[in-house]
């Protein structure tokens, strides 16, 4: 009886308390290796899928980058055209500034001419007034000469009559 008690005490009804043999451990080990190997293949296959997906995304990014590069090239062309237009505007601005300075010089000369003209008008007025004075005097002298001439004619015409009498 004592032997059955000790056997019963060694053998337990709980699965975690049962002893394992080397064969059982080897079988569990092999089973785990197969499962791990299968899991490794599954993981590798998943990684390959993820890598393929990343490659697809990278390819799309490369396409987007290429499109951005095309757009950048277009913007560079537009910028170059704007630079040319800006250069033309700068040349036009420089020409306008030159023309403006020439116009300013002409306006200054016109103003100087107007001042000279006004001064000449003043001098001409003085000369005109002087000439008017000379003409008036000449008119008076001519009137005096005419008077004298008339007087002399009168006297000349009246003297011979006196002498004939």
Image (cartoon, grey):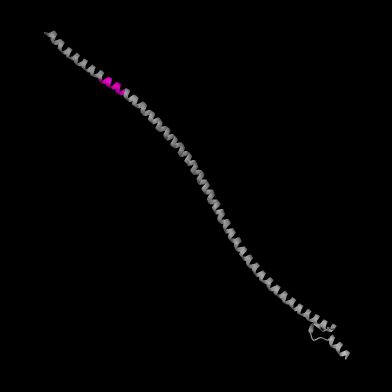
- Side of 19 where 96 appears, left or right: left
Q: Residue at x 25, y 21 (%)?
A: 139
**Number of numbered labels in the structure image:** 0
| Residue situated furthest right in the rendering | 2
Where is residue 69 drawn, in percent x and y? 61, 61
The part of the image, by quadrant, that contains residue 121 is top left
The part of the image, by quadrant, that contains residue 49 is bottom right
Q: Is residue 133 magenta?
A: yes
Task: Note whether 118 is above or below 97 in the view shown.
Answer: above
Task: Note whether 155 is above or below 126 in the view shown.
Answer: above
In terms of secondary structure, what is the magenta stretch mainly?
Answer: helix
Where is residue 122 drawn, in percent x and y? 36, 27
| Residue situated furthest bottom in the rendering | 1
Task: Note whether 164 is above or below 23 in the view shown.
Answer: above
- Side of 62 where 26 appears, left or right: right
- Side of 155 where 18 appears, left or right: right
Q: Is residue 136 magenta?
A: yes
Where is residue 54 drawn, in percent x and y? 67, 69
Task: Note whether 155 is above or below 130 in the view shown.
Answer: above
Q: Residue at x 82, y 81 (%)?
A: 25
| Residue situated furthest left in the rendering | 165
Q: Say which of 31 and 90 sits in front.
A: 31
Where is residue 52 drawn, in percent x and y? 68, 71
Q: Residue at x 81, y 83 (%)?
A: 17
Quadrant the C terminus occupies: top left
| Range covered by the magenta-colored residues | 131-139
Quadrant the N terminus occupies: bottom right
């Amino acid at each position: 009886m004592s032997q059955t008690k000790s056997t019963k005490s060694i053998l337990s009804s709980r699965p975690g308390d049962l002893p394992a043999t080397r064969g059982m451990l080897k079988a569990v080990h092999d089973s785990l290796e197969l499962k791990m190997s299968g899991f490794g293949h599954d993981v590798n296959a998943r990684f390959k899928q993820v890598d393929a997906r990343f490659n697809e995304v990278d390819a799309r990014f490369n396409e987007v980058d290429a499109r951005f590069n095309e757009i950048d090239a277009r913007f560079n062309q537009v910028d170059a055209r704007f630079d040319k237009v800006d250069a033309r505007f700068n040349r036009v601005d420089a020409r306008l500034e030159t023309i403006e300075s020439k116009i300013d010089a002409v306006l200054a000369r016109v103003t100087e001419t107007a001042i000279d003209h006004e001064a000449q008008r003043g001098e001409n007025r003085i000369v005109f007034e002087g000439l008017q004075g000379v003409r008036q005097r000449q008119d008076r002298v001519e009137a005096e000469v005419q008077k004298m001439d008339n007087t002399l004619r009168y006297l000349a015409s009246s003297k011979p009559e006196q002498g004939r009498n």
